[in-house]
Image: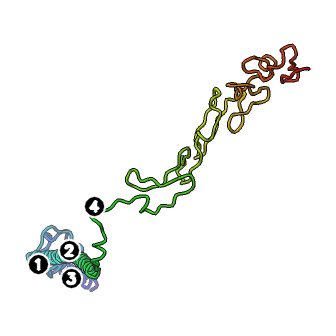
């Protein structure tokens, strides 16, 4: 009895296993499954239209679905790209148009303002010119060059300073210095020139010059001349005594002092002269 029951149990298990294996066979790819099945997670199951796992072959429905998906993706991508391109182009065009319009407006405004300013200035100048009235008397008082009477010292009314006078010798009245006076610095003041500022120029080496409008003597100090007019002698020198030599300096010693031609002690013999103390003098 027990053997019969065990045998039935075994037969029943085999039948169940065969049914299960027939419905869900082990597979690697969809090719291992029967018609209408696909390989999912290593077992053959009913094909529901999806993509099989670990398989390089698709069912017709799966291929159709994939084509639809690819076509949809492509259309979506194309639409997105076209939309992005259109937006970028629109923005670039709008920006370019805005810049062009702004430049055109600025240029137009500048030209309009310049024209308005120029017109306003012209009108203002014209109005000012129209308001200016030149009297006939002013025109008549302007003498013609050919008929104008030249000015003279008597008609010019110049007031000249001391040591100067009016001179119209060149056709233009002006103040000039009198004879022996000069205005070397051009300040309008006439001072004596070297002729009146006698610098004892007859003596060798002395001369006169105008410096800053003033006559100035330059003395030959090497030969003993000194003073404002170079008519004095330095220490150790003495003016000559007679004739042409009375304004010349000679060394102050007995030889020069008792010389017949220019000595200032010619009444004193040389033997009676003494120059021990730096100047010549008679000892009697």
Q: Please provide percent x and percent y for residue 47.
A: 14, 80
Q: CA distance from mark 1 to mark 2?
A: 47 Å
- The tag earlier along the polypeptide, 1 or 3, is 3
Q: Is residue 111 left or right of residue 69?
A: right
Tell me whether circle 2 and circle 4 mark residues in contact (CB < 8 Å): no
Q: Is residue 56 left or right of residue 167?
A: left
**Residue 195 sits above or below residue 46 on the image:** above
Q: CA distance from mark 1 to mark 3?
A: 41 Å
- The tag earlier along the polypeptide, 1 or 2, is 1
Q: Nearer the viewer, residue 274 or 47?
A: 274
Q: Residues within 10 Å of mark 4 (few under 14, many from 20)?
A: few
Looking at the rendered image, the disc whose residue lies closer to the viewer, 3 or 2, is 2
Residue on which disc 4 sits = 145
**Residue 116 sits above or below residue 275 on the image:** below
Residue at disc 2, secondary structure: helix
Residue on which disc 1 sits = 68
Residue 19 - label: none
Looking at the rendered image, the disc whose residue lies closer to the viewer, 1 or 4, is 4
Residue on which disc 2 sits = 100
Residue at disc 4, secondary structure: loop
Residue 16 - label: 3
Q: Is residue 39 visible?
A: no
């Amino acid at each position: 009895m027990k053997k019969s029951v065990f045998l039935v149990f075994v037969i029943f298990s085999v039948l169940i296993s065969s049914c299960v294996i027939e419905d869900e066979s082990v597979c690697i790819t969809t090719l291992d499954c029967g018609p209408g099945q696909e390989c999912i997670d290593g077992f053959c199951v009913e094909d529901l239209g999806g993509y099989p796992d670990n398989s390089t072959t698709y069912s017709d429905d799966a291929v159709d679905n994939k084509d639809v998906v690819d076509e949809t993706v492509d259309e979506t991508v194309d639409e997105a790209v076209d939309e992005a391109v259109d937006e970028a182009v629109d923005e670039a065009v709008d920006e370019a148009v805005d810049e062009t319009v702004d430049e055109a407006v600025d240029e137009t405004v500048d030209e309009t303002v310049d024209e308005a300013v120029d017109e306003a200035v012209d009108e203002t100048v014209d109005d000012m010119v129209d308001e200016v009235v030149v009297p006939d008397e002013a025109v008549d008082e302007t003498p013609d060059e050919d008929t104008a009477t030249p000015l003279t010292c008597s008609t010019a009314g110049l007031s000249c300073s001391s040591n100067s006078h009016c001179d119209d010798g060149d056709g233009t009245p002006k103040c000039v210095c009198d004879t022996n006076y000069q205005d070397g610095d051009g300040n309008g003041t006439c001072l004596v020139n070297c002729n009146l500022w006698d610098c004892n120029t007859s003596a060798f080496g002395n001369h006169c010059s105008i410096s800053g409008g003033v006559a100035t003597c330059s003395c030959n100090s090497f030969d003993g001349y000194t003073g404002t007019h170079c008519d004095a002698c330095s220490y150790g020198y003495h003016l000559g005594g007679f004739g042409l030599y009375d304004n010349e300096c000679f060394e102050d010693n007995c030889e020069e002092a008792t010389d017949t031609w220019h000595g200032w002690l010619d009444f004193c013999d040389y033997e009676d002269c003494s120059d021990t103390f730096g100047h010549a003098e008679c000892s009697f």
